[in-house]
Amino acid sequence: MSQEPFDLVIAGGCCVTPAGTEIRDVGIRAGRIAAIGQLAQAQRVETIEARGLHVLPGVIDSQVHFREPGLTHKEDLESGTRGAALGGVTAIFEMPNTSPTTTTREALAEKLALARGRSWVDHAFFMGAAAENADLLGELETLPGCAGVKIFLGSSTGSLLVDDPDVLRRALRSGRRRVAIHAEHEGRLKQRRSMLDTPDVHVRMHPDWRDAETARLATEGVLRIAREVGRALHILHVTTRDELPLLQAARDIATVEVTPQHLTLEAPDCYERLGTYAQMNPPVRSGEHRQALWAALQSGLVDVIGSDHAPHTREEKSRPYPQSPSGMTGVQTLVPVMLTHVNAGRLSLQRFVDLTSAGPARIYDVAGKGRIALGYDADFTLVDLKRSERLDDAQIASRSGWTPFHGMQVQGWPVMTLLRGHTVMRDGALLGAPIGEPVRFANALPRTDA
């Protein structure tokens, strides 16, 4: 071991590593993990005493909508990443349905510039697929700071939509990175839209309009074309038991994401209790679907948990359905909500780590993040599994200022967020200035053999 002092030692925490969960010290130099073991005698500049805490690899939220540029009355990159850091999240991948949409090299460069000096966590941005850039995606997806390509098969917030099978084929043929998919069938949504034109329309009808067959048809269709062209997919926010057999049969080409909302909330209760604040796409569904998602998670079919943080203002969410927009906050509550499920015995802490750190890193080929291992970025989420708190709208950093989990008693709380060896959040307070940098990806790194 080098005799050079460590910049920081995280001492005595229960570390969740690929080898298991053990009490270990972690030594950090130059923003990376330099040693794991018993480091009581090692020289260091700073020490964080972590006894009684669990030290997790930094949580990666691979699906957020931070609304900048163009929609910053709902959220911006500073407020969105502030919520991420407060919630124990160390990296985010942001979606392309902003205004303008992220469909060009210039739009990606603008987002990276907007994040510079304002982002509290590391970040990357998805490139949105559209008819006009379908043949250029193979080039665009390798740009530094690009998380990959996102395809909307059904209309949601914003104007991005690929509902033409020929455009979808072109998009999937262009490039080689795994493509993120919003799987709702636009044709079926249009056919069923008239069911909302009734005097007694209510938001509880949202999962009837955007029904399970809407999701199943889209997933079935995109899996068929992906297999035809040989492209790997990541199906976002899966919500139905109907899709799960299709995805189980497509493990060679498709990975699966679910959200804390779909694992925790349930229709019709959430619509009666929260009204339009429970509205999102795809919808929160009935108990049979939620139970199927938990079975899929416990069987290993689910690869990632992402928050699908998609804020709207209270004024917007309070509009009568269906004029109300779809989307909820989630990046700040992902960790405590899911740790509550860990404490309830629904999944292990090791599985939580795989779903929120190693899983996103594996699926998107993130370089140097996602696990506590030598040489990796010193990103950590320190949590107190015994700490109980009540979630409250007043805690939410998002400009929207609300959470669908308001009033929920949670057990398991993020107490510290470290980014490349720097403490950016401690005991609910942000420290210093924003130091977030673009996430590095193996498929986007410069060649070293040129």
Image (tube, rainbow, N blue to C red):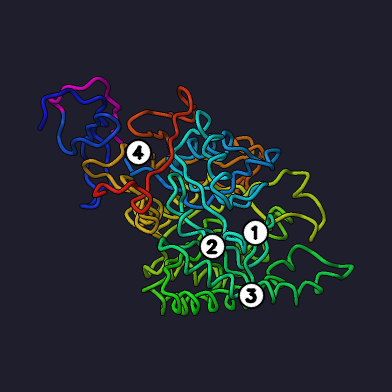
Q: Amino acid at mark 4?
A: Asp
Q: Are marks 4 and 3 in contact (CB under 8 Å)?
A: no
Identify the residue position indicated by label 1 in the image.
Answer: 160
Q: Earlier in the sequence, mark 2 or mark 3?
A: 3
Identify the residue position indicated by label 4 in the image.
Answer: 379
**Numbered disc 4: secondary structure:** loop
**Numbered disc 2: secondary structure:** loop
Identify the residue position indicated by label 3 in the image.
Answer: 214
**Numbered disc 3: secondary structure:** helix
Identify the residue position indicated by label 2 in the image.
Answer: 237
Neighbour tally class for label 2: few under 14, some 14-19, many 20 plus, Cα within 10 Å: many
204 sits left or right of 212 in the view: right
Residue 334 at x, y percent in the picture: 50, 48
**Numbered disc 1: secondary structure:** loop
Along the line of sight, the residue nearer the viewer: 165 or 268: 165
Q: Earlier in the sequence, mark 1 or mark 2?
A: 1
Along the line of sight, the residue nearer the viewer: 385 or 92: 92
Magenta region: 40-52
Q: Are marks 2 and 4 in contact (CB under 8 Å)?
A: no
Q: Amino acid at mark 1?
A: Leu
Q: Which mark is residue 341?
A: none
Check the picture and name the quadrant holding the N terminus.
top left
Along the line of sight, the residue nearer the viewer: 410 or 280: 280
The quarter holding residue 231 reads bottom left
Outermost residue on the front side: it is 450
